[in-house]
Amino acid sequence: MRQLFKDYEVRQYVVQVIFSVTFAFSCTMFELIIFEILGVLNSSSRYFHWKLNLCVILLILVFMVPFYIGYFVVSNIRLLHRQKLLFACVLWLTFMYFFWKLGDPFPILSPKHGILSIEQLISRVGVIGVTLMALLSGFGAVNCPYTYMSYFLRNVTDADILALERRLLQTMDMIVSKKKRIAVAHRTMFQRGEVHNKPTGFWGMIKSVTTSVAGSENLSLIQQEVDALEELSRQLFLETADLHATKERIEYSKTFQGKYFNFLGYFFSIYCVWKIFMATINIVFDRVGKTDPVTRGIEITVNYLGIQFDVKFWSQHISFILVGIIIVTSIRGLLITLTKFFYAISSSKSSNVIVLLLAQIMGMYFVSSVLLIRMSMPLEYRTIITEVLGELQFNFYHRWFDVIFLVSALSSILFLYLAHKQAPEKHMAL
């Protein structure tokens, strides 16, 4: 809490507790996944902790967080302040209605489960969370190589930066000069007594517009020129800052670490193309992998090389490493994204609501991660997870992820292409 929201004081103790408990139980789910692979604790104990963990986090995500979001939203509205508890309940009931209707269009559940069963709740939470995961994954798969690869950097020289800075200084000088003229004109008007004796009425307005003041100075026209120059100066300043950042990235790309990240950019580009291709194949042929990627990859390698290899033994260790990397990068990436989002939109009045929204997004994101990570685990390690989650339509979530990922990735490619193409044109126009 101190690290994420250090610039904004979150005074409500209940908000701190809800966020911390959501984060703790989300991380505990990932810890239980590692326990499944390593065989830590008795299987009955792991099953009990899975049940307890899911019940608590679903209780928070479906009942507590939405109610308190509505409560703090109503608290910020003065007209509803006296009946804030009543209106908070109304908002929560509205959320529950739409949350429940969310499950109608999707084939996510067997109809025999009860209304408040884990399966009913987690199936709907999974739809929202998987959609969020797919959107972030699609954008990240495209934005990562675009950010790291030096191929996408503009060729910026010191001469370009100096020329733009010179234009910025000239614009600032023109602004200062015109503002001086306005100040001198106002002082002359004040000395003549024209400020206190302004003509009134319709004819007075016509006279003030048509009469030149202080040596034929048209103040309204000069003010319009100042406004236009100030807007130009803002654009020039932003472009100068962008050129400096690009120049620093060019210098950084020449270092060893920069070359390493450039290589990662090419790797992620290949991964992005492969992921888009596989998502398209999965959607077109309506298929979902039956074997986890680690075991499948080892089997293909062993059969190709024709060597003796204990696939079951090594798949456990490699799955542990792979799932660990997925967990760490998921938590780190989501927290960084949420922190940037919070800093961008938060204020002293909205900080409690924003923190609760982040807790809601984080909880749904991590619950959905469990649904999708399950496919990355060998079959013998996903048994308890499958039993705890119940009779969910797991194949639907993977297909839904592929659809949203494909839409997000293609939209991100189009957006970054237009932004990259527009940047040189904007620079030339300035």
Image (tube, rainbow, N blue to C red):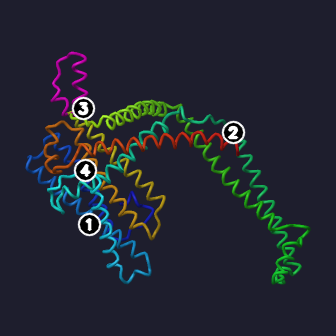
Residue under label 1, please give it.
63
User: Which residue type does callout 1 highlight?
Assistant: Phe
Task: Characterize the magenta stretch by its predominant secondary structure.
Answer: helix
How far across and how far down the image is residue 249, in percent? 55, 38
Of callouts 1 and 2, the N-terminal one: 1
Quarter of the image where one finds residue 244 = top right
User: Which residue type does callout 4 highlight?
Assistant: Pro
| Quadrant for the N terminus in the image | bottom left
Q: Badge 2: how crowded within 10 Å, few (<14), some, or many (20+)?
A: some
* Dot 4 and dot 2 residues touching (CB under 8 Å): no
Task: Return the residue found at the far right.
Answer: 215
| Above-or-below relation of 358 to 15 | above
User: Which residue type does callout 3 highlight?
Assistant: Val
Residue under label 4, please give it.
107
Mark yes or no: residue 156 visible: yes
The residues colored magenta run: 291-316
How far across and how far down the image is residue 368, in percent? 28, 50
Residue under label 3, please give it.
294
User: Which residue type does callout 2 highlight?
Assistant: Asp
Separation of marks 3 and 4 at Cα, in angstroms: 29 Å
Q: Name the residue at 36% across, 79% down.
A: 84
